[in-house]
Amino acid sequence: MKKLLLSAGFLAAISMTASAAPYVLPTPQTGALTPYDWQPTYQVEFLYGIAAPSSTYSDLYGPRISFNLYSNQEATFRHEWSIDVAALWGDETKNGIKREEFMLPITLGYALNIALTDDILLYIDGKAGVAIGDMKWKDLDNDEDLPKYSSTDFTFLVGAGVKVIASDAIQVKVGYEYQRAYFDKTLGLHVISVGVGVTF
């Protein structure tokens, strides 16, 4: 009888302790995403770069592909790191000379995303890396190829824009960037970008 009463008292004490203990959220399952995880986002953009000075260079256009690690933290400020590769082409004919240009910027980037609403983000970004440049000229009057120019040098971009969260997996992006490519220190580009990002 004493053992029975002792056991009942012990169980009652445990149950009172358990009921007084604070509630602890269950640990997320392995592999489950939380709002604080970094998520990979693949992004494809179309770029149009207005050259400055335009008397020396033609406008450039082409695609840019990015692999981003995106902070999905549900906060006002969200961070994003990226690896970017673009391929830009341009050609122009002036005074009987045809000029063809190609540029391949390979950069690492960081963007600070600022939530204006649940679905609209303002971003400020910067990228730096190398740009491979190639320029060819042809004298059309004499049908003669002139010496071409190729170089690889430092490049950087700074810009800002807006992202719209279309769904949990899709972002639409519109922005502006200023780019300098140091294989020619006079070359600047005012780049307009439109793209789509997909988060897996």
Image: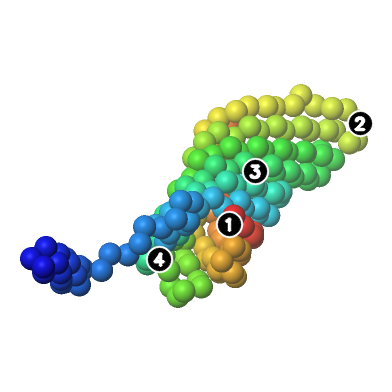
Residue at x-position 63% and y-position 27%:
151
Q: Along the line of sight, which residue is nearer the eye, 49 or 35?
A: 35
Which of labels 1 and 3 is toward the front?
Answer: 1
Give the residue at the far left of this rendering: 2
Question: In this rendering, which labeled residue sits more in front, label 3 or label 4?
Answer: 4
Q: CA distance from mark 2 to mark 4?
A: 61 Å
Q: Nearer the viewer, mark 2 or mark 4?
A: 4
Q: Which residue is mark 1?
A: 199
The residue to which callout 3 is attached is: 86
Query: Helix or strand or loop: what does disc 3 sit on?
Result: strand
Residue type at numbered disc 2? Asp
Q: Nearer the viewer, residue 194 or 29?
A: 29
Look at 74% across and 26% down and name the residue there: 148
Q: Residue furthest bottom?
A: 117
- Counting from the top left corner in percent of width and height, residue 134 is at 70, 32
Between the residue at mark 1 and the residue at mark 3, the CA separation in whole angstroms equals 20 Å
Can the viewer see residue 58? no
Distance CA(mark 1)–CA(mark 2): 50 Å
Q: Which residue is mark 4?
A: 74
Task: Tell me the CA gap for discs 3 and 4.
Answer: 30 Å
Question: Residue 159 in the image: x percent, y percent?
Answer: 49, 55
Q: Is residue 128 above or below residue 158?
A: above
Q: Is residue 64 visible?
A: yes
**On screen, 133 above or below 64?**
above
The secondary element bearing badge 1 is classed as: strand
- In three-dimensional space, the C-alpha distance between marks 4 and 1, rounded to whole angstroms, equals 16 Å
Q: Amino acid at mark 1?
A: Thr
Q: Secondary structure at mark 4?
A: loop
Relative to 74, is 32 above or below?
above
Q: Quadrant of the N terminus?
A: bottom left
Q: Which residue is mark 2?
A: 143
